């Protein structure tokens, strides 16, 4: 067996020993559990180990070190907010150019007729759920020819008046 094989064998044995030690540790902890809350805390600790790493000391402006977490957070906040301010001051604003190059369509530009509404109603999928109005697509599809004219009038009046009722 070569050096690589020995290394792989060592790694396997090491991983096995680590798993065995972890199992023994948590079995001992499990034997100490007296309540269901303690059980769930143990389970949480065993399956979700904390991976948070603390930030080391940070230099203050006077070159001394800050070790308190709150002070380090304030130092980082001050630093990153000043970076944004410096960047904003150094960047020249872009010249204004209108984005819209053609006329924006209006609701009044949408063609509406009884035949269009009837066609849309016939294309409804009856298996879909009801809308917020509580009317099922199956009912609208079946009643399409008889409700197309009133719906067309309702839509046209709504567009003329600019009123939409929930």
Image (tube, rainbow, N blue to C red):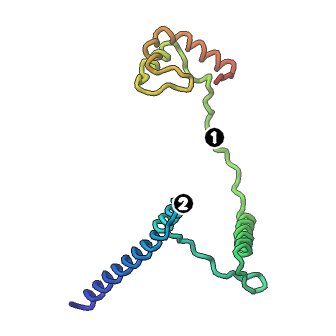
Q: Marks 1 and 2: which is nearer the front?
A: 2
Residue density around tag 1, few if under 14, some if 14–19, many if 20 or more, within 10 Å: few
**Disc number for residue 100:** 1
Sequence order check, earlier mark of 1 and 2 = 2
In percent of width and height, residue 140 lies at 47, 17
Give coordinates of residue 143: x percent, y percent: 46, 12
Query: Which residue is at the far top?
Result: 146
> Where does the N terminus fall, quadrant-wise?
bottom left
Expressed as whole percent of the image width and height from the top left, the position of residue 20 reads 36, 77
Residue with the most extreme front position: 34
Kindly identify which residue carries mark 2.
37
| Callout 1: SS | loop
Q: CA distance from mark 1 to mark 2?
A: 61 Å
Q: Is residue 99 above or below residue 39?
A: above
- Badge 2: residue crowd in 10 Å (few <14, some 14–19, many ≥20): few
Q: Is residue 107 left or right of residue 142?
A: right
- Taking the image as shown, residue 151 lies to the left or right of residue 163, namely left
Query: Does residue 155 appear left or right of residue 117 in this picture?
Result: right
Q: Is residue 34 above or below residue 132?
A: below
Q: Position of residue 160 (x, y in %)?
A: 67, 18
């Amino acid at each position: 067996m070569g050096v690589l094989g020995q290394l792989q064998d060592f790694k396997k044995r090491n991983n096995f020993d680590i798993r065995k030690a972890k199992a023994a540790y948590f079995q001992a902890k499990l034997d100490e559990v007296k309540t269901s809350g303690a059980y769930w805390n143990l389970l949480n600790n065993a399956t979700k180990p904390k991976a948070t790493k603390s930030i080391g000391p940070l230099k203050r402006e006077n070159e001394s070190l800050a070790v308190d977490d709150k002070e380090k957070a304030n130092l980082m906040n001050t630093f990153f907010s000043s970076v944004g301010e410096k960047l904003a001051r150094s960047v020249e604003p872009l010249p204004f150019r209108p984005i819209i190059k053609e006329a924006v369509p209006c609701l009044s530009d949408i063609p509406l007729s009884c035949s269009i509404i009837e066609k849309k109603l016939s294309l409804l999928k009856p298996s879909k759920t009801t809308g917020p109005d509580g009317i099922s697509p199956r009912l609208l599809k079946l009643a399409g020819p008889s409700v197309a004219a009133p719906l067309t009038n309702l839509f046209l009046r709504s567009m003329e008046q600019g009123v939409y009722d929930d």
